[in-house]
Structures are given as C-alpha cells and as structure tokens.
Amino acid sequence: MPQGRAMHTMTTTNWDENGQLEVLTFDIGEECLAIEAVSIREILDLLPETRVPGAPDLVSSVVNFRGKIIPIADLRVAFGMPIDADEGPGVDHRIVVIETELDNETIQIGLRTDKVHEVATLERSDSSEPPVLGMRWRREFVRELVRQTDTVIVLPDLQEIFRSMAGAA
C-alpha cells in the first residue's frame, strides 16, 4: 500500500441466503441509489431546515422531527454532483431518515432525495464492485453497482461517507 494513504475498509453488503437484498430506491440528480430497507425509519416530506454554522457541507443543516433533532445529509456533496441553489425543492423531494452505525454508535440521519421510488429486491448476480477506472465518484463511497433493465443502481457506502466527513471535521 502506498505510504500516506489510509486503508479503506469497505462496508459489506448483507445479501440474504438467496442472494437478494431488499432496498429503498431513490433518485439524486440523474442517479438512482438504494439503501437497505431495514435501515429506513421514515420517509418525510421536506421540513424546514436550520443551517448549522461551521458544519461540513455534507451535513450542513438539521430538522426538528417529532421533537428530535436530525442532521440532514446531501449526498450530492459526497459524490461531487452539482448543487443548483436556484432550483427550489420539487414536489417529489423527500427526506429519507435512516438509522446506521458510525464509530460504534447508532445514529439517525436524514438523506435529502429528489424522488423516492419503491422498495425493491435486488439480486446479487446483477451486482459488481465499482470499477477502478471510469468512475466519476470516489470509489470508496460506492459499495456495489447493480445492473437493472434500464439503469444501474448505486449502493453507496454511507458509513464510509460519514466516516470521511467526521474525519474532515
């Protein structure tokens, strides 16, 4: 391993014994992403966000949901996708609240999405690791790519994305 580079520990995908994975699919920009259905806690209409001064761009605001403060992540930042400040929220925009582990602590975080699709079952036989070349995103932020008839679904490595954000803070 080259000196000066931290070793990346890729999060593994928990395919079931039949090689399947139940996910919630959603769009961010032109990309279709998926998160394991067991991680989903709520799907919310957009709520008023409060900016947090000095917070990283990835998680720069919070919402008050049922008396609980939940940080909101914009995966566009992690994937280097353009953020159009002039474009306001659309009718399909939602916040997907997930529960995940970060540094041995269970956290809830909201993911800003452009459109939530459905709960779907993916097949391991349709998946592959992200290629070494030809990716426009940081490879360590993508666990797997899953081929579908009309698109490729990205399984992001949220733990790695949030770990990198915590390390940069």
Image (tube, helix red, strand yellow):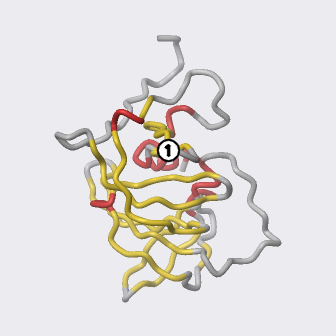
Q: Position of residue 38 (x, y in %)?
A: 27, 60
In this figure, which residue is indicated by the disc labeled 1?
A: 148
- The single residue placed furthest to the left in the displayed view is 17
- Residue at 57 percent across and 46 percent down: it is 151
Q: Residues within 10 Å of mark 1 (few under 14, many from 20)?
A: few
- The residue lying toward the viewer, choosing from 159 and 27, is 27
Q: Is residue 46 above or below residue 124?
A: below
Nearer to the camera, 45 or 22: 22
The picture places residue 78, in percent across and down from the top left corner, at 60, 48
Residue 19 position by quadrant: top left
User: Which residue is found at the position 61% from the left and 67% from the top?
Assistant: 114
Identified by mark 1, the residue type is Gln
Q: Tell me the residue at 67%/35% (across/down).
A: 136
Where residue 36 sits in the image (x, y, percent)? 34, 55
The number of numbered discs placed on residues in the rendered structure image is 1
In this rendering, the answer to whether 63 lies above or below 103 is: below
Secondary element type, mark 1: loop
Query: Residue 75: x percent and y percent?
Result: 57, 55
Q: Extreme front residue here?
A: 149
Residue drawn at (62%, 46%), measured in percent from left and top?
A: 79
Q: Quadrant of residue 76?
A: bottom right
